[in-house]
Amino acid sequence: QTVVSLWEDVLMSERNKLGDELWTVYEQVCIAALDCQRIDISETCIELLKSKFPNSLRVKRLLGMKYEAEERFHKAGDLYDDIIKEDETNMFARKRKVAILKAQNKTLEAIEELNKYLKQFMTDFEAWMELCDLYLAVQDYTKAAFCMEELIMSNPHNHLYHQKFAEIKYTMGDPDNMAIARTYFAQAIKLNPNSVRSLYGCFLASSNLAASSNRKDKQSNIKYAAWAAQQLKEKYTTVQPEDLTNQTRVLESIERVLESLTEKTSN
Amino acid sequence: MAELIVSIQAYCKILLHAVKHPNCAVNGVLLAEDNKSKDRKVLKFVDCVPLFHLTLSLSPMLEAALLQIDAYCKSRGYIIAGYYQANENLRDKELNNVAKTIGRRIQENCANSYIFMVDNERLFPDAVSEMYRIYSPREASWKEEEKLETVTEETLRVASMLLSSQTFREVDVVDFDYHFNDITRDWRNLPINDLLQKCT
């Protein structure tokens, strides 16, 4: 929105002063305009870019994005197919095809298309994340977990990947997956001790494991839960002002869960 | 069938949360006055707490959030009685599986609960009707409640003003995603409550 208003108010009249940067600016304004549904501005930009760079694939993709914004998905799809024919390694056009399917809510087809893309471009991490989210949208947790595994393998030090993987395993619910979740949350905490999400994750996973009966490691799970709870309480008390903590009752909520665990063991 | 009332605060916060993240799905819970001893026929939603805008469907963060909100509610005499969700796509107003699952969770705690599915296409300043469809639980699934008026003219006026005056751009809506990233950020959104007070 800011880009578009800046363009309209300032840059349009001062175009000549931009020199060669002008063309990159046009491209950026075009995309910003599409985001704000200002098709008029985007059309102007595309025309100008086309006259300067007649056979450019970059300009073609902007045209494709404009069709997408106008919801002329067929035209956009055909255009991207043309781009791919001309340049088989064009990652952008392939990804836009997935985006078109997503915009039409055709999640399953989007998944299929993205899978095809990843067979060729296996190192595109953004694409793996997107595929993970698509699987989550259709609640296929096993495949979503697989996507995260690929990401963890390539970037083993990224705590966010461990954390998301753990969250997916937790969501799957059964005790074995819950144990895996706890392990990965612990790893995420190791990589980033400040991560509140991982601490909560570890706390809840351990509590769940401790609460389910007949597990041999009940005691150790209670200890993990207690440890995580302690870390969380420290974080909240050191970082938040006291009245906020009191008002939101966050410490009490953690206490309650711990208490219910110890009650169960004494029964 | 109970009468539902949605306060200005609850309604506008849902609106602000949804427009703050136009490229994501967002969700949150609605808090109502706990009516155990009072008139059961009217359910008044007094506030809402925005939950997430990143991944809506993963359990651990949802459970952590609900734990906190529940403790907060008990201290104020509220109960989590509603859930709202706005889908990612402009034209997608379907009650999807995520909404149904979370709705069920809330219903386990509060039998008289409702799902509010935001219709993204109704999120504009000149809208004359409410921006969501309401669903109530029926046996194994959810049924849309039609012809329910839950907000006053005043509420719609304030909502319209927030959108047309572009105020929503300056407002910071703190949801649980932001809170978990930085726990100093308060999910009760008190500054927004103050702003809304001033608008009425």
Image (cartoon, coloured by chain):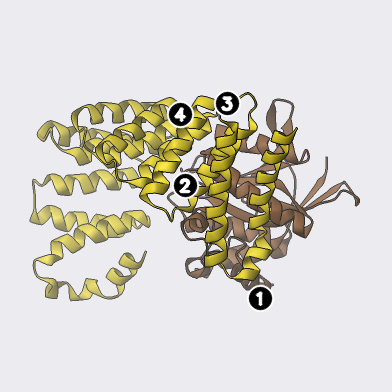
Query: Could you say whether the residue bearing mark 3 is in a helix, strand or loop?
Result: loop
Which label sits in the foreground, 3 or 1?
A: 3
Q: Same chain for the residues at labels 2 and 3, yes or no?
A: yes
- Give the CA separation, mark 1 to mark 4: 45 Å
Please identify, in this view, whether the residue under mark 3 or under mark 4 is nearer the observer: 3
Residue that numbered label 2 is attached to: A198
In the rendered structure, which disc, 2 or 3, sits on the residue that comes first in sequence? 2
Q: Amino acid at mark 3?
A: Lys
- Mark 2 lies on a secondary structure that is helix
Name the chain under label 3: A
Camera-side mark, 2 or 3: 3
Q: Nearer the viewer, residue A201 or B46?
A: A201
- Which mark is nearer the camera, 1 or 4? 4
State which chain disc 1 sits on. Answer: B
Q: Which residue is mark 4?
A: A141
Amino acid type of disc 2? Answer: Ser
The amino acid on which the numbered mark 1 sits, given as a three-letter code, is Lys
Check the rendered structure and report the hue given to chain A: yellow
Closer to the chain start, of discs 4 and 2, is 4
Q: Which residue is mark 3?
A: A216
Front tag of 1 and 2? 2
Residue identified by numbered label 1: B198
